[in-house]
């Protein structure tokens, strides 16, 4: 399974052809911003635990609750790499997936999906979905971003105050009061178009996730028991990550008519709170 390594004066990064999945990114001199499990499995038809999986054309078990594999097929297949460009130390990598590489009877349509990952002092991820079929289709989509943190129990996320979310653990709809904190398993789908900031006191930094074309933000941390239950996840690794995912899921799914396209974009940036000497 091929992957491309970026190592320039501006940034370090890595992206796999498997799922067009970003596996690493950090601006030069910074601690890793994207998290990858030390237990991740790299194999055909297996999702890589960490990085930025692309969930498409459904999220989780889909709107019906009956779709399989979880999070769709796009993260399980090889995406042909169609372009790589470099300018001033910023490297952009493009992958394209169509029904010629990945079909599924649960999504029997002609589509074209273009993923562009730009590794610079920011990480910019763009997903363009085009309906190349003769009939309309609907899909869910997410950039399932695993962020590296110093200690999940001390981070907070601002930008979701007042947003309604579906608590997947309790199957309840709730309105967010104040910043999101982690003191147990969290699995929530927020209805929100807002940018968010992850404050990380242990690493003395903030990570900003700015987005467009997205009406859902998913926040996930498996905490203790679920970490132990996952074979490709270290028992203590829940402390090292939180997922802040950019998507359009559930009743925010996108419908495209023939010839239409939808673009979703995420820009991840990091600012250090450490005084410069
Ligand atoms: C999150 C979901 O996006 O991904 C969670 O909201 C899920 O419910 C998690 O457990 C991990 O999913 P997976 O399929 O990669 O184990």
Image (tube, rainbow, N blue to C red):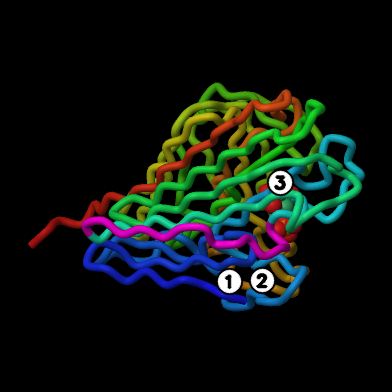
Marks 3 and 2, the one that precedes in the sequence: 3
Local crowd size for mark 3, using a 10 Å CA cut-off: few (<14), some (14–19), many (≥20)? many
Marks 1 and 3, the one that precedes in the sequence: 1
The answer to if 60 sits in the magenta stretch is no
The image quadrant where one finds the C terminus is bottom left
Tell me the tag on residue 56. Answer: 3
| 38 and 155: which is toward the camera | 38
Marks 1 and 2, the one that precedes in the sequence: 1
Side of 264 relative to 230 (left or right): left
Side of 141 relative to 31 (left or right): right
Which residue is denoted by mark 1 in the rendering? 37
Question: Which structural element holds mark 1?
Answer: loop
Task: Tell me the magenta residue range.
Answer: 75-88
Question: Which structural element holds mark 2?
Answer: loop
Which residue is denoted by mark 2 in the rendering? 233
Tell me the tag on residue 210. Answer: none
Res 180 visible: yes
**Depicted 101 relative to depicted 170: above or below:** below
Quarter of the view holding residue 31 = bottom left
């Amino acid at each position: 399974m091929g992957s491309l390594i970026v190592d320039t004066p501006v940034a370090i990064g890595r992206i796999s052809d498997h799922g067009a999945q970003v596996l690493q990114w950090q601006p030069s001199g910074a601690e890793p911003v994207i998290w990858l499990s030390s237990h991740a499995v790299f194999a055909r038809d297996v999702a890589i635990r960490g990085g930025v999986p692309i969930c498409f054309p459904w999220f989780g078990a889909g709107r019906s609750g009956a779709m399989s594999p979880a999070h769709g097929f796009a993260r399980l297949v090889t995406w042909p790499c169609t372009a790589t460009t470099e300018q001033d130390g910023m490297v952009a990598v493009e992958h394209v997936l169509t029904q010629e590489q990945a079909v599924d009877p649960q999504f029997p349509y002609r589509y074209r999906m273009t993923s562009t990952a730009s590794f610079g002092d920011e990480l910019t991820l763009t997903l363009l979905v085009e309906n190349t079929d003769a009939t309309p289709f609907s899909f869910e989509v997410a950039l399932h971003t695993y962020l590296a943190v110093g200690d999940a129990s001390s981070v907070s996320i601002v930008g979701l105050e007042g947003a309604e979310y579906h608590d997947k653990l309790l199957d309840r709809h709730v309105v967010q009061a104040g910043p999101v904190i982690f003191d147990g398993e969290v699995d929530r789908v927020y209805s929100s178009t807002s940018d968010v900031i992850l404050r990380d006191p242990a690493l003395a930094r903030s990570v900003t996730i700015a987005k467009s074309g997205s009406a859902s933000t998913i926040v996930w941390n498996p905490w203790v028991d679920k970490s132990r239950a996952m074979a490709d996840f270290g028992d203590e690794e829940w402390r090292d990550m939180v997922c802040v995912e950019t998507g359009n899921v559930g009743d925010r799914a996108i419908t495209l008519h023939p010839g239409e396209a939808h673009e979703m974009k995420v820009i991840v940036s990091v600012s250090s709170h450490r005084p410069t000497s």
